Image (cartoon, rainbow, N blue to C red):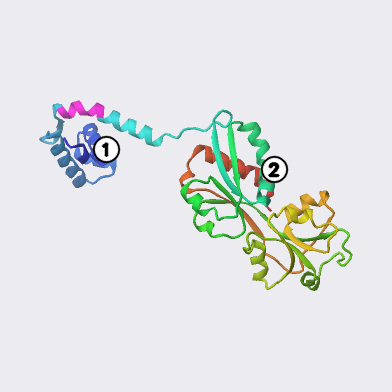
Amino acid sequence: MNLAQLDLNLLVALDALLREQNVTRAGSQVGMSQPAMSAALSRLRVLFEDELLVRVGRTYYLTPLGGELAAPVADILHRIRETVERRPAFNPATDERHFIAAASDYVSWVVLDRLLPVLATEAPNLTLELMGTEQSPAPKLASGDLDFAFLPGPTSLVTQFPHDLLFEDRWICAVSKDNEEIGDRMTAEQFHSLPHLVFRQRQQSSLLDRALLAVGVERTVQVSLSNFLLLPLLLHRTPYVIIVYERLARRLEPLTRIRLLEPPFPLPKIPVRLYWPRQRSSDPAHIWMRNKIRELCSDLKP
């Protein structure tokens, strides 16, 4: 027999024929029509060089070879089903796993502040490697070299990879507490005329740049930084204006001498999503990690 000619569908058909000893009933068991099952039986007879199932009057009988094949064929299919359906469990308390994630400084601050204490106690053998988001994480997500990407704002990754909305944020302005030029409210004229301290990476337009462009607003940029978290920390005793994520600003406000103000024009909310490779969707350890991140961020949703 040439095993290359024996596909799994034929093995399934053979098992049904040997069990039911009837072409029509065997076809019904595996969702095949009577003609299709008859054709499968013909192919099996050629492969095994045996009738396997013979009809005497209205009754079918197994040949000696057919009788010998019944048990081992059933066992083979059972083992195949077990192998295909097996999903190794993940025990966070004992199992080892290394994850690689990409996240901006801002998202790292918000998410990892919640996640790391939990990992330390619930998954002590799990290790996490964090990368920046200066380069698009799309190629590494596609290849599976990256397990997660935490990204704010609208992005083309939404149409390319599985994702979850973790939370939303909004933009808020801030000035130094001792800035006397601005009162309790900032006007559009003040926003345009005052110098700005901004975040930019490698001369690329930022998420905020694109949001401002969409509403026709320009800034007078005085200083550009490549570290977003430094913006509120360097604002004290300067005349600068910054626009930052509100969650970040609220957390840093007690630690810095800054004053928060509403932007003088409407800006869109900022969705923060978790992305992962499609090929990791059914991975038990990956599922555990995604569920834990969702759980820890659930109270951040509006």
User: 167 or 106, which is in the foreground?
Assistant: 106
The image quarter containing residue 40 is top left
Q: Is residue 48 left or right of residue 223?
A: left
Q: Which amino acid, by three-letter code, is at mark 1? A: Val
Helix, strand or loop for the magenta stretch, by majority: helix
Q: Nearer the viewer, mark 1 or mark 2?
A: 2
Q: Secondary structure at mark 2?
A: helix
Q: Position of residue 183 (x, y in %)?
A: 87, 66
Q: Amino acid at mark 2?
A: Asp
Query: Is residue 71 inside the magenta stretch?
Result: yes
The image quarter containing residue 199 is bottom right
| 141 shown above or below 28 | below
Question: Mark 1 — residue?
Answer: 12
Give the magenta part as a residue range.
65-72
Extreme-left residue of the structure = 57
Using residue 249 as the reference point, say whether residue 112 is left or right of it. Answer: left
- Circle 2 crowding by C-alpha within 10 Å: few under 14, some 14–19, many from 20: few
Taking 261 as reference, is 73 left or right? Answer: left
In the rendered image, residue 136, in percent from the top left (x then y), is placed at: 55, 55
Q: Which residue is mark 2?
A: 113
Q: Position of residue 98 (x, y in %)?
A: 55, 37
